[in-house]
Image: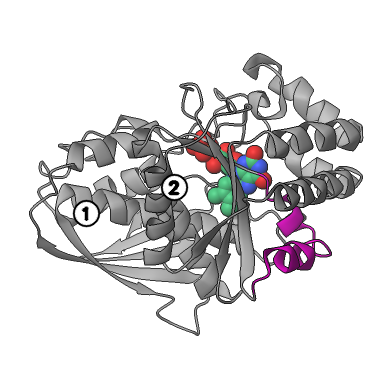
Amino acid sequence: MAVPDDPWDIAPEALSACRSDAERWQVLCAWAVLAPSSHNSQPWLFRARGRQLELLADRRRALPVVDPAGRELVISCGAALGVMLIAARALGQGLEVAPLPDPAQPDLLARLSLGPALPPPADAAQILAAIKARRTTRRPFPAEALPMDALFAADDAALAAGATLRWLITPRDRYLAAELIAEADRIQMADPAFRAELAHWVRSRHAPSRDGMSGEAVGVPDILSALGALAIRSFDLGAGQAARDQALAEGSPALAVLTTPGDAAADWLAAGRALAEVLITLQRAGLTASYLNQPIEVPGLRPRLAAMLGSEEAPQLLLRVGRGPALPPTPRRPVAEVLEHA
Ligand SMILES: Cc1cc2nc3c(=O)[nH]c(=O)nc-3n(C[C@H](O)[C@H](O)[C@H](O)COP(=O)(O)O)c2cc1C
């Protein structure tokens, strides 16, 4: 293996040390899996064959209750693709991408080909450092004005990947979005199947499966993750969750909805690529993001959010943005588990 067991330990020099295309794909996949994914389910598979690589959806890692269509699953895979492309650019590795190349194989999300070596950009080291430093930060962000140039750069990053960031600026929009988030929390948490699915993915960051979310994501110390999961499964904690999330949304320095022109697999993949570009752009400006996707996940509420935006586009993710503390990384499965060589 050309890569360390823990993908977070991937070194910027690893690609230049590779002696074969198989090794190059190992290194590029190690960068890709540092992407965020819904519930840290890491629902991606890679298949390398010579100079080509296939990215496939791993439906065994689906979240059928919160994400029955696999929309967030494809967004997560799109984020992995996006992070791979960002890393490849920084490493001076040309990559060509064909999204959804075969209508007969809907789980084949992209086919990539190694291109020629390119001169790496002057800020390569900062880009790679930002990929490693990115975290989902669920804590409240300090109320402060954010640097406009960073938000404009995030806008451009989303647009270049085929999606749009729509900032919720007026007090009315922020209030309505916070209300929708709270309503969605109450609906989701009242559903025992939703709670069981969420609880299934809550585990210590030291668990051998190297996936899922620490109890810290649901407000308990990592060591008490099993108790946190039990509480989620057993009790409807929707009222408390709704109040907390409503306060988070209303107090957030910035809130944005990521939208796409349509709502098909190609849009979801583009949303994931855009998410990666946006998060790395924000990270480079010292900013972090967190998700309040609930009103997009509850079918009855998604059209209300879209109407509030006054746009024909499909909402895909609802993000809050701010400055957060340094956090330890969440676990990732080793590359050997997600990459097969044909
Ligand atoms: C499509 C998608 C949806 C997500 N939805 C939520 C969410 O609703 N709530 C939340 O707290 N985190 C959400 N996340 C963040 C993941 O839980 C997080 O990426 C994962 O636990 C890995 O942690 P990391 O981002 O710090 O590496 C989402 C991530 C993605 C890519």
Image quarter for ligand 1 equals top right
Q: Is residue 34 visible?
A: no
- Residue occupying the point 54% across, 66% down: 268
Image quadrant in which the C terminus is located: bottom left
Give the magenta range: 292-311
Is residue 302 shown in magenta?
yes
Residue type at mark 2: give it.
Leu
Check mark 1 vs ligand 1: CB closer than 8 Å? yes or no: no
- Residue occupying the point 39% across, 44% down: 150
Residue type at mark 1: give it.
Arg
Q: In the structure shown, which secondary structural element does the residue marked by tag 1 occupy?
A: helix
Position in image of residue 133 (x %, y %): 38, 31
Q: Determine the CA span between mark 2 and mark 1.
A: 22 Å
Q: Pointer 2: what residue?
A: 151
**Vertical side of 267 occupied by 217: above or below:** above
Position in image of residue 340 (x %, y %): 36, 55
Image quadrant in which the N terminus is located: top left
Position in image of residue 171 (x %, y %): 71, 46
Q: Pointer 1: what residue?
A: 89
